[in-house]
Amino acid sequence: MASVIVHPEKELKVVGTSPLRPDGVPKVTGLAQYGADFSLPGMLWGKILRSPHAHARIRSVDTSKAQALPGVKAVMTSKDLPDQKFEYVGPERVAVNFWHMTRNIMAREKVLYEGHAVAAVAATTPAIAEEALKLIEVDYEVLPHVIDVDEAMKTEAPLLFEDMITRGIDPPPKEPSNISKRIEYKMGDIAAGFAAADEIVELSFKTKPVHQGYIEPHATLARTDADGQVELWVSSQGHFVVRTMVCRLLGIKTADLRVHAAEIGGAFGGKTVVYVEPVAVTLSRKSGHPVKIMMSREEVFRGTGPTSGASMTIKIGVMKDGDIVAADALMKYQAGAFPTSPVMNGLMCGFAPYDIPNVRTIGYDVVCNRPKTVAYRAPGSPISAYAVESTMDAAAKKIGMDPLQFRLKNIAKPGTQLVYGAKIAHEGFAETLQALQRHPGYTKPLGKNQGRGMAVGYWFNGGGESSATVHVNEDGTAVVATGSPDIGGSRASTAQMAAETLGIEYERVRPIIADTNSVGYTQATGGSRVTYATGRAVIGACNKVIAEMCARAAKIWKIDVEDVIWEDGFARPAGKRAGEFPPLSFKDIASKRTATGGPIVAASAINADGQGPGFAAQFCDVEVDPETGQVKILRYVAAQDAGRAVHPKYVEGQIQGGVVQGIGWALNEEYIYDRNGKLENPGFLDYRIPVASDLPMIETIIVEVPNPNHPYGVKGVAEANIVPPMAAIANAIENAIGQRLTELPMSPPKVLAALDAEHRG
Amino acid sequence: MAKVHVTATLNGNAVEFLCETRQTLLQILRDELHLTGTKEGCGTGDCGACSVTVDGRLMCSCLILGAEMQGKSIQTIEGMADGEKLHPLQRKFLEHAALQCGVCTPGVLVAAKSLLERNPDPTEEEVRYWLAGNLCRCTGYNKIIEAVLDAASEMRRA
Amino acid sequence: MHEMRYEAPKTLAAAVSLLAGASGQARVLAGGTDLLIQMRGGRVDPELLVDIKGIPEMTSIVAENGVFRFGAAVPCMELVEHEAFAKAWPGVTDGANLIGSIQVRGRATAGGNLCNASPAADTVPALIAAGATVSVVGPKGRREVPVEDIATGPGKTSLARGEIVASFLLPRRPPRSGDAYLRFIPRTEMDIAVVGAGINLTLDESGVCSQARVCIGAVAERALLVREAAAALIGTKVDAEALQRMAAAVSAACRPIDDKRGTKEYRIKVAGVMARRAAQIALDRARRKN
């Protein structure tokens, strides 16, 4: 790793080191318990029946034969779920509509995609449950379907919802369509901007939906009591989110549903909603037994959310000196079977790295007969960045400017107005680009059939609601309880921040993820928010512990608390009492808790804002096989602003992981449908995520421009890294073969076709 | 349904179990013997999360029937550490931060151990190809490869 | 759900009689890397599984005077690790070393690969190019059959009820012989061949190609032995021009379909490329073997 620190801070002891993760040993010995690893006495196995059709009306569902099969203890359909009010709840960017959600969990009037859940059973063995599914008779009236976003927008397209009127158009259209929403942002004078431009570049792009591809399929275990109390073990990014959704979907009192966060086997946004959880609870209630549901990999691909595929057109006006004077974008994102896609994020993030005076972005949210999309790492931003950053490259080429220099010339700075209303509030973009520019590889000569490409990426990062509780033990250790499921090492980073704040050794802090009844409300692990927002809650609770520690010391010394200070893990008499008593350590005070007032506990809760945006800049070298179109990644260099890297090795890991997901998205990952709208590749054999032998080492450059709103300068690091790769690779391929690929994935047949076009042309 | 009685060796200890003929070794390990360290990621041999060795050979336990295990010696992740003493690979995975979510980790460790038993001094490329059957979606494989190479180097010196 | 019987006979005769006497669907279980997936997906639902891995002829590798006989149930990893075999038949070894992952190769067998009858099977083109035969044992006794006569179409074979492919026989090689197998996949591992090409050739003392066999996979309903492609090499020094004519003959013989793994056009084009590259490797290997 290379590291660039822009503003050196005071020396920290624990933050900035890479200690072993506190939850590591059980994960290398096989003892860690993930979603599917929990069992209870008397437990049943739940299985879900799924639609074989992409679009069909459900005439009837007959479960009587399944119900009669020996060993079957419960059968359910959508009739067992209360219907929900049609309303969008929450901020527009992440609005939820429970009318849609309950229909996605179990189809009611229609099935809207192949794999849509229709019924479920619980039985004494998995084999009996499977057998029972075959006995459920569903009478379908098969309807025409639509898979592609451009097709779905046509007036003659089959409608998923016969009454859906596009939101965001005034006056509202009279006819229903598959367009759920139109969104437009603009600033400046777009027409004048293009009129003044020396050169205009306009390109159109298409991307395919891609799956998050976590290795652990969805799994849950539910237990219900006759008095209405429910306990759930979940593999989720947010056990509080599961609680909110399941309570609302099933009408359970919030205090009666206790949700435990199991270890989670990858998620990347895909485990921020519920699928099997309300089904398991319903089956458990109906049968009186605990119920476990594990999805198969095939169910994961057919029934859970990818991120959107899209169709986009980008237009950029530039001056010969490199100034961008106008930018226009049209982005059509697939939402899947129900609104809402992350098109709004795409519109907001696409041009956000740049200072451009005249900008317009227009987006459409479009439903089609595919699984409902769900968040995937920086949701929406990688899609628009592929289009925008490819067009930026073409613009730089047109005026004969180095693409990195071109971006640096136009980079957004603190105070830059963005099209969606916000102003850039943080430094870090230019510093990150400059760090990439200084990498010796950026100017290294290339060989035959090789090319180099670069791109940048922007992501909001998240703040939001988090809680933490710190318990001090009599031996001077501390337990830090948070409500943030740990996917990639956040227990390590929160323990580090706690140790740093308290002034004790990292090894004396035991971080845990408490269940929903044991710690305050905490939003999901997503949006790169945990180390920032939950970190601030932990630091807040630690500061309260310190205040209490000082009070206890004052009590022991019989002096005023104002005369006690906390320094490097010790209470010291200060001010007029300075030097009167030897300092008391954290452990000394902890051991005297009974005599000084009892247990030492502090809780802190926060609704954090002020997170710095994530920014990534990357370049890669590729080699194209001219006879097969296969693209090999020779080198990949990724720079990212981390604010401050609390655990540098895990920051590198986030960057490397995000880049490699982007490489898969760029080169091979796609859903392949047959003419009936059935998914042909619902498995890891033909949904091709990168394997170890496909890749070089991913070189990382951690740039540290501290975030003034976090005590240790933290900015979230999990997502910005997946934003640039598709464009960086497209730009490198263009550099190698002289042809721009405007459709993802850039798989060998497409590259070979482009090469043939080059030879013909 | 008549079950098959199987006696085998599991992590060095004698074990016997009854299995339905359709049950896979993975299901036997997880659901009957309660060793849940071996994970199901796909059930079709495409991800390697269920990797075990049978008579010293690396395999996907989802592609083996329990009934085939009569007289066989099975090694799973639970048998890798010696009591509280971690195997060098386990230690190096922690030191290198070679796991994020950790769900692929048991399979990767079992596969890496099998590699180093055959080839104590593999190149980066050899490690990458040997582990190509173990999907990891979190790490980009970087730190996994580094940890295996470092463990190999330490084991050669030992 | 009906009961599925599992049997592990110790002799070929016992296996044959189990298979021939089964009342419902019976399947041979070798590595199980295709069968178990088909069972999981509900595509096959056998009444009887006959695990043949306890039968000595089916699990051993025997070399005699340059002739190799290996059991149809020998896992690919064992074949790959057999030094004498890998030295004699590097192209067949290439094929066995490309199936799935290390884990899959620990179980998968050439016999299963052949009898599963996928047009994209990786060991089959190399074995056909090698001129391998199989020993088929059934209720009517034993017969020796060229490998290319087993698969008849996707999932279909010429085997009669109760017949088992027991072992493969690879002939003694003349000096200056080399073989190779190459396939195209989008990733570097873990994929099914989009196209595959197996080449086996022999040079005379002056470096002229005296014998050649060219077989391509995943471009038709089964692996194709392309005699025109071999003819383009025989009598030449396997120079660039001969390789180009051979590649053109390969492409001309392709009759692929469009599917999720590749288009017709792409397969036809890349089949020629793979065949040419494989021939170059086979040539280099032949030149090293005097």
Image (tube, rainbow, N blue to C red):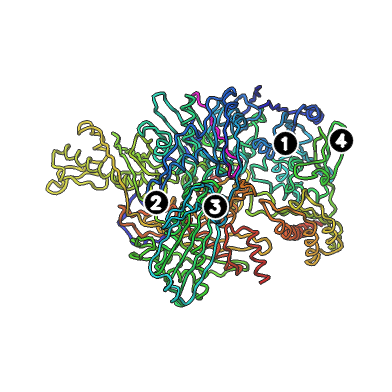
* Mark identifier at residue C142: 4
- Marked residue nearer the N-terminal end (2 or 3): 2
Q: Which residue is drawn at the image coordinates 57% and 50% (left, top)?
A: A158
- Marked residue nearer the N-terminal end (1 or 4): 1
Pointer 4 chain: C
Disc 2 to disc 1, C-alpha distance: 56 Å
Residue that sits furthest to the front in the current view: A174
Tell me the kind of residue under disc 2.
Answer: Glu
Q: Give the image location of residue A283, x and y in percent.
A: 49, 29
Tell me the kind of residue under disc 3.
Answer: Pro
Q: Dot 3: few (<14), some (14–19), or many (≥20) neighbours within 10 Å?
A: many
- Contact? badges 3 and 1 (CB < 8 Å): no
Left or right of A535 in this view: B1 = right
Q: What span is in magenta?
A: A39-56
Q: Which residue is drawn at the image coordinates 18% and 45% (left, top)?
A: A564
Tell me the kind of residue under disc 4.
Answer: Arg
| Nearer to us: label 2 or label 3 | 2
Residue placed under numbered mark 3 in the picture = A209
